[in-house]
Image (cartoon, rainbow, N blue to C red):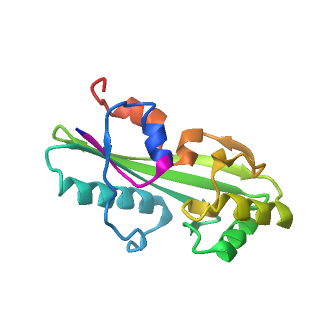
């Protein structure tokens, strides 16, 4: 059985593109416990999630993922509250950031951990647009305080995978993990 080690509804929807049959187990890990450079953080968090679930289900295949947003060398995690979300979005206005999603697959005697980067270029955002977005979309469970799929004119363009920005780099996973036709 394949287990998606994630509580993200977006990852669940994206994984359905690759695999029809899987179950979900939310890993019990503190995502803020690791103090690593941005380039390593998502991969280590992904591994931590995968091993937490694999310890409970050692005979199953595990897929986990972690996504972070990096702006000018600073990691923008999930906002703590409305004010924090507004502050994050104001920082990103008119700038380029990098979304790093790392996934870990454990199964059939192998482990794969890969990190995929996508460059995201933000539009110049008005205070009114930011406040409207945060009030209506409540992006408190999203790294960087936004969802690319939310239908707001936050993003000018991206270079790389759209699915990666949503939280699961499906194209890279399909190229490196075989789910056996499930």
Residue 50, image x, y percentages: 29, 54
Asked if 177 appears above or below 149 in the picture, the reply is: above
In this picture, which residue range is highlighted in magenta? 2-9
* Of the pair 8 and 40, the residue shown nearer to us: 8
Task: Tell me if 69 is positioned left or right of 56 in this view.
Answer: right
Quarter placement of the N terminus: top left
Residue 161 in view here: no
Residue at point 34% right, 57% down? 26
Choose top left, top right, bottom left or bottom right for residue 19: top left
Residue at point 43% right, 63% down? 41
- Whether residue 7 appears in magenta in the rendering, the answer is yes
Residue 84, image x, y percentages: 65, 74
Choose top left, top right, bottom left or bottom right for residue 178: top left
Number of on-image labels: 0
Task: Tell me if 30 is positioned left or right of 72 in this view.
Answer: left
- Whether residue 32 appears in magenta in the rendering, the answer is no
Residue 67, image x, y percentages: 49, 55
Task: Tell me if 120 is positioned left or right of 176 in this view.
Answer: right
Residue 124, image x, y percentages: 83, 57
Residue 84 in view here: yes
Asked if 121 appears above or below 76 in the picture, the reply is: above
Task: Tell me if 147 is positioned left or right of 10 in this view.
Answer: right
Quarter placement of the C terminus: top left
Residue at point 43% right, 34% down? 16
Choose top left, top right, bottom left or bottom right for residue 98: bottom right
Asked if 62 appears above or below 37 in the picture, the reply is: above
* Of the pair 136 and 38, the residue shown nearer to us: 136
Asked if 109 appears above or below 7 in the picture, the reply is: above
The residue sitting at the top extreme is: 181
């Amino acid at each position: 059985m394949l287990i998606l080690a994630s509580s993200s509804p977006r990852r669940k929807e994206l994984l359905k593109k690759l695999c029809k049959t899987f179950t979900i187990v939310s890993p019990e890990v503190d995502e803020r416990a690791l103090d690593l450079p941005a380039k390593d953080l998502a991969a280590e968090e992904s591994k931590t999630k995968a091993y937490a679930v694999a310890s409970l289900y050692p005979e199953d295949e595990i897929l986990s993922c972690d996504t972070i947003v990096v702006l000018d060398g600073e990691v923008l995690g999930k906002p703590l509250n409305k004010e924090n979300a507004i502050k994050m979005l104001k920082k990103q206005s008119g700038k380029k950031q990098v979304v790093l999603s790392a996934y870990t697959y454990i199964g059939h005697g192998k482990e794969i951990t890969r990190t995929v980067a996508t460059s995201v270029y933000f539009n110049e955002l008005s205070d009114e647009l930011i406040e409207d977005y945060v009030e209506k979309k409540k992006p408190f469970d999203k790294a960087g305080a936004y969802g690319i799929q939310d239908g707001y004119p936050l993003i000018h363009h991206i270079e790389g995978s759209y699915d990666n920005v949503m939280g699961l780099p499906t194209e890279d996973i399909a190229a490196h993990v075989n789910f056996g036709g499930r």
